[in-house]
């Protein structure tokens, strides 16, 4: 009797167990199917809602087509009037720093449909002769754009030229100012390399970097050497701060713009109050160049000129160390003022 009851219990347990396993297997299969058909939590609902379209993307095509024709001088006055094209004073200026990556920054920002770059360095505020020509001369140097776009120019000499902050302030006291910096010693060597190349092109000889950067009499860093002075970022910035509040400046990490440009560009988009439009699609690494290049669309892409990304000469490591020690306290002050810290030695 007992044996019969035990057998019955085992049978019941077996049936219940099978039912439980069957249910679990069914649920797994069902949820899997549902998951494929209709995600339980679609990824879009986890992202913030897309911002309203402020800049019509069709502008991008216009920009590459019509504005290009304009630059070549092919667009008619009628077209300019029809499309409401204007030459606008810049709403943001890349004021420096020379060899910091100013060209790369300008070209990369120009990928944004709301940005139009002035191709040439205008040197309006640092060159007395140009400045004397007046603001209309400056405006006429600006590219044509749609009224909702912003014009950006870059002239790295602005950062170090004494008169410039006051002159820019007089034009527009609320202008946005971009400064792109690199590790100061590397920047100084890059600066030297550019001058050296110019001399070599003219078959001229030139000093070694070490002999320019270090005063041979005192064995101290030669602060009269322009490439050294330019890298004392805080000294120059302090002059600017007599006219503009620190919030009007945005510091771009030029070293990161080389290795990973997109996050730097996204910070600039935010600073300029522009919707985020530059994407990874617009930037691709070119192994031959060793740099990121620009992709505007499926047919048009470009790398920067060969004069950007020169090979630097070897510098005596003791000179490098001396320079890095020299720049250190100035760098600390620069971090303190700007609120942007770098891993510079
Ligand atoms: P080097 O020539 O020392 O490498 P600027 O335009 O202010 O003169 O700066 C030139 C520097 O931009 C170059 O210095 C280079 O390293 C840097 N750079 C940053 N991004 C670049 C890019 N995508 N292509 C070429 N050079 C780039």
Image (cartoon, helix red, strand yellow):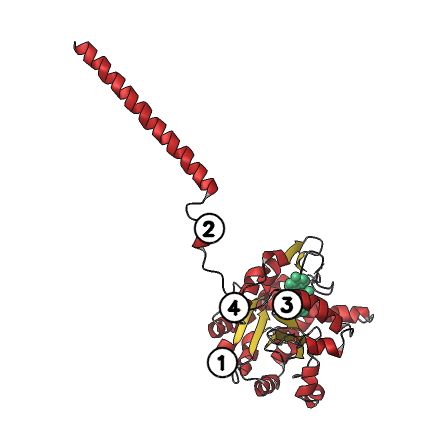
Which residue is denoted by mark 1 in the rendering? 245
Chain-order first, disc 4 or disc 1? 1
| Residue 82 appears in the picture as rendered | yes
Secondary structure category for the residue under label 1:
loop
Secondary structure category for the residue under label 2:
helix
Secondary structure category for the residue under label 3:
helix
Question: Of circles 3 and 1, which is in front?
Answer: 3
Chain-order first, disc 3 or disc 1? 3
Quadrant of ligand 1 in image: bottom right
Label 1 Cα neighbours within 10 Å, binned few <14 / some 14-19 / many ≥20: few
Which residue is denoted by mark 2 in the rendering? 43
Residue 334, image x, y percentages:
51, 73
Which residue is denoted by mark 4 in the rendering? 270
Q: Horizontal placement of 32 versus 304: left or right?
A: left
Quarter holding residue 321 = bottom right
Quarter occupied by the N terminus: top left
Which residue is denoted by mark 3 in the rendering? 59
Chain-order first, disc 2 or disc 4? 2
């Amino acid at each position: 009797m007992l044996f019969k009851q035990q057998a019955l219990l085992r049978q019941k347990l077996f049936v219940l167990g099978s039912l439980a396993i069957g249910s679990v297997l069914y649920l797994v299969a069902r949820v899997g199917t549902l998951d494929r058909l209709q995600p339980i939590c679609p990824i879009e609902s986890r992202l913030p809602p897309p911002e309203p379209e402020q800049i019509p993307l069709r502008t991008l095509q216009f920009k590459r087509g019509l504005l290009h024709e304009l630059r070549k001088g092919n667009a008619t006055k009628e077209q300019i009037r029809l499309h409401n094209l204007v030459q606008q004073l810049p709403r943001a200026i890349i004021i420096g720093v020379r060899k910091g990556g100013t060209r790369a920054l300008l070209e990369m920002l120009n990928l944004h449909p709301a940005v139009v770059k002035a191709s040439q360095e205008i040197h309006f505020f640092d060159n007395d002769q140009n400045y004397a020509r007046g603001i209309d001369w400056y405006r006429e140097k600006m590219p044509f754009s749609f009224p909702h776009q912003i014009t950006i120019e870059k002239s790295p000499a602005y950062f170090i030229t004494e008169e410039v902050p006051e002159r820019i302030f007089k034009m527009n006291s609320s202008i946005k100012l971009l400064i792109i910096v690199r590790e100061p010693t590397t920047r100084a060597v890059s600066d030297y390399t550019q001058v050296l190349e110019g001399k070599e092109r003219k078959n001229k000889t030139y000093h070694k970097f070490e002999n320019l950067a270090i005063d041979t009499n005192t064995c101290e860093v030669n602060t009269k050497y322009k490439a050294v002075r330019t890298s004392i970022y805080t000294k120059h910035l302090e002059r600017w701060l007599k006219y503009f509040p620190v919030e009007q400046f945005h510091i771009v990490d030029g070293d990161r713009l080389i290795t990973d440009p997109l996050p730097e560009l996204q910070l600039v988009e935010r600073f300029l109050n522009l919707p985020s439009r530059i994407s990874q699609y617009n930037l691709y690494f070119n192994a031959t160049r060793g740099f990121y290049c620009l992709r505007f669309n499926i047919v048009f892409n470009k790398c920067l000129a060969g004069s950007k990304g020169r090979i630097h000469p070897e510098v005596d490591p003791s000179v490098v160390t001396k320079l890095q020690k020299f720049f250190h306290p100035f760098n600390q002050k620069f971090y303190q003022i700007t609120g942007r810290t770098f891993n510079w030695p």
